[in-house]
Every structure is written in C-alpha cells, then in structure tokens.
C-alpha cells in the first residue's frame, strides 16, 4: 500500500510503498477514507535528531476516518464497511485517567510506549490503518468522512479547551481566539454554538481573519504589537474572560496574558514553545492558565454530535496521497485556509 512517511531527519515527507497490515487478535483494520494534515506534524519534523522521540520511518496522520475492512479475533460490535472516526490520543485503558475516558491524559502511556497514530505509532496517511482496539473507533453515523476527519483533532482539541472555560463565558463576556487557522476557525464556531460570548479573533493573515468573520467572529483584529491594546479598547478596558491561543508562540502567549480579564481562563493550545508567567502584577488577578492536550473519548463523541447538528463545520481542501508533500509545503507556508485533508484511496 502507499503511505506518507517521514523517513529522514530534516527531510520532506515521502510517498512510499509499504506492506499491507493485517489485524491480529483484538485489532481492527481500516480502509482509510481521509487523513488530516496538521501543524503538529510539521513540529515533529522540525525536531533535531538528538531530541527526536520516535523511530523512523514514521507514517504520518493522526486525524483519521475510514471504513472497517477486517477485524481480528475477539473483536465484536463492528461490521465490515462501517464508517468510523479514530480517537487519536490512545492510552493504556486501565489507569485512573483512562477509566474516566481521558486517554489523552493517560498516566502510563510513556512508560508503556503507547503513542498516537502518526505521532509515534504508524499513522493514517496510508491506504490502510491498523487500530489496536475497537474502543478507539467512534461511528460517523452519517457524517462525511472527508469533512469530518479534522474533528478528531482540530475539532476535539478546541472543544476540550472551550468546554473547560464554559462557566466563565456568561452573557456579557468576551472570548478571544488567537490564530484563526485549522483549530481556531473551529473554536470560533464552538464558542458561538455553546456560549453567549462576544468572540474576537486575532491572526496575522487577512485571509484567515476573513475566514474568522465568515464562521462567526464578532470582531477581528490583526495580531501585531497593537493587538492587546485593540482588544482592551473593544472590551472597554476589561479584557476577555476566555482566551484561547492556538499558536502558542511567545508573542501570541504574551498577547493572551495581556488581554486576560480578572478571573479569566487562558488556554495555551498551540505548540510553538511560548510560556506565560503567572503571578501578582504579572497577570490580572486570579487568571488561570492551562496547557490542554487533545480531548477525551467522550468529548470526541460530543464534537461529532455537534457536527451532525450543523453547529460546527471544518473548511477543508483535499489532496490525493501523491500530493501529500505539497499539502505540507502549503501548510508550512501558511497557505492552507482551514484544514488540508489527504485522500489515500482517492
């Protein structure tokens, strides 16, 4: 089968031919319908050799939908041909966090060498994907596998962050979304669907600010050195009760802290390495800063339900598997408006 792999430190991903996987006991083989292209992949491919945590070659793709192609011995409750979405942050299934469905916070994954597909384990940017347990598969139940595949990360991750802040996002409140790309444009829709908050979106790209307005942002602000002052002006000097940074670079994290209101929740979701100090005279009083990661299995079910209701929709542009390196080039250059999706089987 064809697969998109990162094969050499510092090199571009390649389309290669690898053996077809076969399901063993308890495993499920998927025929991949779609796989998302994510900035996390670019971050991984930017790590130097001395700190690279995974074995190479690495088949990419941690956002995956597909249909059940075959099941291993002992697997029940799935039918061949059933369309499913893959829950990515897979855990041990037995620790305290996994027992809550929060496999994204598995306490033993590192110890046991458990990795998400595409981020340590073979990913879904291939014609077939082997899934180790049926519990990681959720029914699509009528959703389009192509437009819904980003929901498994670009939908789930902002949902997890927004859901945590819901008690702060009451009538009269403001939410700021920094970065209106793949995750940010979904976060705007979630905020509009789940809260009465006024939503202000920040980005360096006028094209992405136009996307932010199209999906429901009340105000858009160019993310430059004046951005924090502009948000303060728009909020009468009070700032925002919920701040969601989907970039995570030091300038955007600094802006996030500067626009946070008293008792605000600040979620640093982006992985660009920025950090926000917390303390008296550093942030507003009682600001809570979190660094959330992905979301729970139950929350993925909630995101899929929101999509079925029409409350959230991901803007996608599609590529064949041989065009995957081009999709990564466009994402790295900031030219993807929404989310890039690879169709391994056409």
Image (cartoon, rainbow, N blue to C red):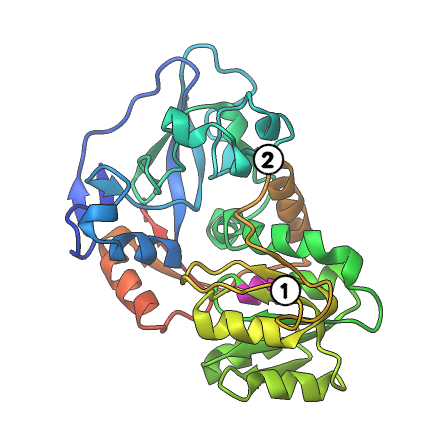
| Residue at horizontal 61 percent and vertical 76 percent from the top | 258
Quarter occupied by residue 40: bottom left
Horizontally, is 48 left or right of 178 in the view?
Answer: left
Secondary structure type for disc 2:
loop
Relative image position of residue 110 (x, y in whole percent): 40, 32
Tell me if residue 311 can be seen: yes
Secondary structure type for disc 1:
loop
Magenta run includes residue 186: yes
Magenta run includes residue 183: no
Q: Nearer the viewer, residue 89 or 320?
A: 89
| Residue at horizontal 48 percent and vertical 49 percent from the top | 149
Seen in the picture, residue 154 relative to 23 is either above or below; the reply is: below
Q: Are the residues at dot 1 and dot 2 in contact (C-beta closer than 8 Å)?
A: no
Q: Nearer the viewer, residue 140 or 97?
A: 97
Relative image position of residue 166 (x, y in whole percent): 75, 56
Residue on which disc 2 sits: 102
Relative image position of residue 105 (x, y in whole percent): 54, 37
Relative image position of residue 44 (x, y in whole percent): 31, 52
- Disc nearer the start of the sequence (1/2): 2
Task: Point out the stretch of residues depicted in magenta.
Answer: 184-188
Q: Disc 1 or disc 2, which is closer to the eye?
A: 1
Near mark 1 (Cα within 10 A), the count class, few <14, some 14-19 or many ≥20, is few
Seen in the picture, residue 132 relative to 66 is either above or below; the reply is: above
Label 1 to label 2, Cα distance in Å?
29 Å
Q: Residue furthest front?
A: 280
Residue on which disc 1 sits: 279
Task: Determine the main secondary structure of the stretch shown in magenta.
Answer: helix
């Amino acid at each position: 089968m064809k697969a998109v792999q990162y094969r050499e430190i510092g090199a571009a991903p390649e389309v290669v031919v690898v053996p077809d996987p076969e399901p063993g006991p308890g495993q499920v083989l998927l025929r991949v319908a779609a796989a998302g292209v994510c900035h996390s992949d670019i971050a991984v491919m930017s790590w130097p050799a001395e700190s690279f945590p995974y074995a190479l070659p690495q088949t990419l793709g941690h956002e995956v939908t597909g249909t059940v192609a075959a099941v291993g011995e002992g697997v029940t409750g799935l039918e061949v041909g059933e369309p499913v979405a893959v829950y990515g942050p897979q855990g041990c299934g037995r620790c305290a966090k996994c027992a809550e469905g929060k496999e994204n916070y598995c306490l033993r994954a590192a110890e046991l060498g458990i990795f998400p597909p595409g981020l340590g384990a073979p990913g879904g940017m291939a014609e077939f994907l082997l899934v180790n347990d049926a519990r990681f598969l959720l029914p699509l139940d009528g959703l389009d596998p192509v437009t819904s595949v980003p929901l498994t990360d670009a939908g789930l991750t902002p949902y997890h962050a927004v859901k945590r802040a819901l008690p702060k996002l009451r009538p009269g409140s403001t939410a700021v979304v920094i970065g209106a790309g793949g995750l940010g444009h979904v976060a705007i829709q979630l905020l509009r669907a789940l809260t009465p908050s006024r939503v202000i979106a920040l980005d360096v790209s006028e094209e992405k600010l136009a996307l932010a307005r199209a999906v429901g942002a009340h105000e858009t602000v160019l993310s430059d050195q004046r951005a924090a002052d502009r948000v303060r002006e728009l909020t009468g000097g009070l700032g925002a009760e919920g701040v969601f940074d989907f970039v995570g670079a030091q300038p955007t994290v600094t802006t996030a802290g500067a626009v946070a209101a008293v008792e605000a929740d600040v979620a640093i979701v982006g992985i660009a390495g920025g950090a926000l100090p917390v303390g008296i005279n550093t942030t507003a009083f009682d600001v809570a800063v979190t660094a959330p990661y992905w979301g729970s299995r139950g929350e993925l079910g909630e995101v899929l339900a929101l999509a079925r209701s029409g409350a959230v929709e991901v803007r996608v542009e599609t590529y064949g598997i041989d065009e995957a390196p081009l999709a990564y080039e466009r994402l790295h250059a900031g030219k993807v408006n929404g989310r890039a999706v690879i169709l391994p089987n056409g």
